[in-house]
Structure formats: C-alpha cells, structure tokens
Image (cartoon, grey):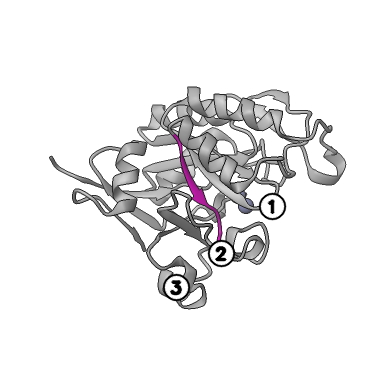
Amino acid sequence: MSLLYLPAEFHLHTVLSACAEIEMLPPLIIRQAQKLGIQWLAVTDHNSAENAGALIEAGKRAGIAVLPGMEVQTREEVHLLCLFDELEPALAWQEQVYQHLPDLPNREETFGSQLVVDAEGEFLRFQERLLQTSTSLSVEQVFTMVEALGGLVIPAHVDRPAFSLLANLGIIPPGLHITAAEITPRLTPAQALERFPQLAGLTLITNGDAHRLSEMAGRTLVRVAEPTLAELRLALAGADGRKVWVT
Ligand SMILES: [Zn+2]
Ligand SMILES: [Zn+2]
C-alpha cells in the first residue's frame, strides 16, 4: 500500500469560538489550508462541534480531509483535543459536554460572539450559551467517554502555563490512554522533552491553535494510508510504517 505524506493542522477554531477572529469561516480556512499545502485538518472549537459539519463540507469540495473534533475544558481547567472520524459521534460527544457545561448565557460584549455558520460561511445562528468555560467533567472522564464513542484524546498545548495537563495537574496521569501530546510552536519536541521530562515516550505534535488564519501552520507531517482516525492512531504509535513528524 502506498502511503501519503500529509501536512496537518489538528487544532483549529472557527467563529463558534468566542475568542476566534471573524475570518475563521469554513471557505477562508480551507483557502488558507490550500495556500499552505495543508491537506488534513481537525476542527476543535471550545466545548462544541457545531461548526464541524460545515468545515467538513467545505473541505470535501476542495479535497481536504477534516476530522470533526472539539477542544474540551475539564473541571481541572485542562484543555483536551477530542477527535472523531465521523460527525455523528462528535455530535453525540457535544450533547454530553453540553450536559456538563453550566447553563449560562454567553456574554457577547465580554467574550465575543459565537457564530454557527454553513459551509459557505453564511451566518445561521448565534450559539447563545456560554461555551468557553469549564465543564464538570474530569480529565479521566473525558478520556473514558470520548474513547467509548471511538474518539481520540490528545492533551492540548501541554507546555502552556495555563489550561494544560502539565500546568494544571503537574503530571501525566497514569492509567490514561495517552499516546500523544500537543506542544505549541514556541518550542521543538527536543526542547519540550528537556523542559518536561514527563513527556518522554509520548508522540509530540505541533499545531497553531489557530484563532486567526495566520496562525495556521501545518507543521505536523503525518504519513498514513488515508486521512482517518484509525490511521492517525497508527501514525501516533509509529506502527505499520505510519509516522508523525514535527517540521
Ligand atoms: Zn486551549
Ligand atoms: Zn484552542
């Protein structure tokens, strides 16, 4: 089987994230990906997957694979990327997350607006509830629940001094199925390992955590047979000739 080398970006916010710029619309994200040669995306808005379908559709038209996902915030204020193969389990996960979010309205003037859009980037509705806050789910619960839905959890920006597994918990909790961790573009995998020896044995990936188009980077290169979650798991494990590099 011939393997593909796909520049990827697995941590990306759309206009559904209050902190994202208004330019983070499906057609513009896909155009930026094309410009940069990024061939595989995951959409990971804060505590919601409501724009995932739109980005998948926009990607399909351009031949760019998009995994539906979410950046969930646990009760320990840890950010975890949750990736799925299909929209259905991603939306099932979203329902569970919504049940564990405080039922509060978004304060647009303070946080920014949360827009649900279609594949063309046309406005559909506001998401009125507050998304950008902690759920009542623990790190352990997120791993268990996402895995039960067939999803993959990757701790986000572990080198950041806040909202990260290492900053908030101090350790990689034993007993979790952690195979990979995301580091920011601010440091290389070698520098990350030097600063955080706890990361030894994990596959490190880098994403732009893009809240604006210019933050998309495509610095993670993945060698897989096809852009599916099963193949990504193999690549993160370095199995069957699949592999991940930070470029
Ligand atoms: Zn984050
Ligand atoms: Zn993020």
In what element is the residue under mark 1? loop
> Of all residues shown, which one is farthest toward the bottom?
194
- The answer to whether mark 3 is within 8 Å of ligand 1 is no
Instruction: Please tell me the numbered disc located at residue 211.
Output: none
Mark 2 or mark 3, earlier in chain: 2
Q: Is residue 111 positioned above or below 238 on the image?
A: above
Q: Which residue is disc 1 drawn over?
A: 76
Left or right: residue 125 versus residue 24 is: right
- Is residue 222 at least partly visible in the picture? no
Q: Which residue is disc 2 drawn over?
A: 171
Q: Position of residue 37 (x, y in %)?
A: 37, 49
Q: Is residue 107 positioned above or below 209 on the image?
A: above
Q: Is residue 224 magenta?
A: no
**What residue lies at 46% left-to-right and 76% top-to-bottom?**
191
User: Gap between marks 3 and 1, in whole Å?
Assistant: 23 Å
Instruction: Depth check: give the residue in front, 149 or 227.
Output: 149
Range of magenta residues = 151-159
Residue 103 picture quarter: top right
Q: Position of residue 242 (x, y in %)?
A: 24, 50
Residue 201 picture quarter: bottom left
Instruction: Please tell me the numbered disc located at residue 193.
Output: 3
The amino acid type, in three-letter code, at marker 2 is Ile
**What residue lies at 83% left-to-right and 38% top-to-bottom?**
108
Between marks 3 and 1 in the image, the one whose residue lies nearer the viewer:
1
Left or right: residue 177 versus residue 27 is: left
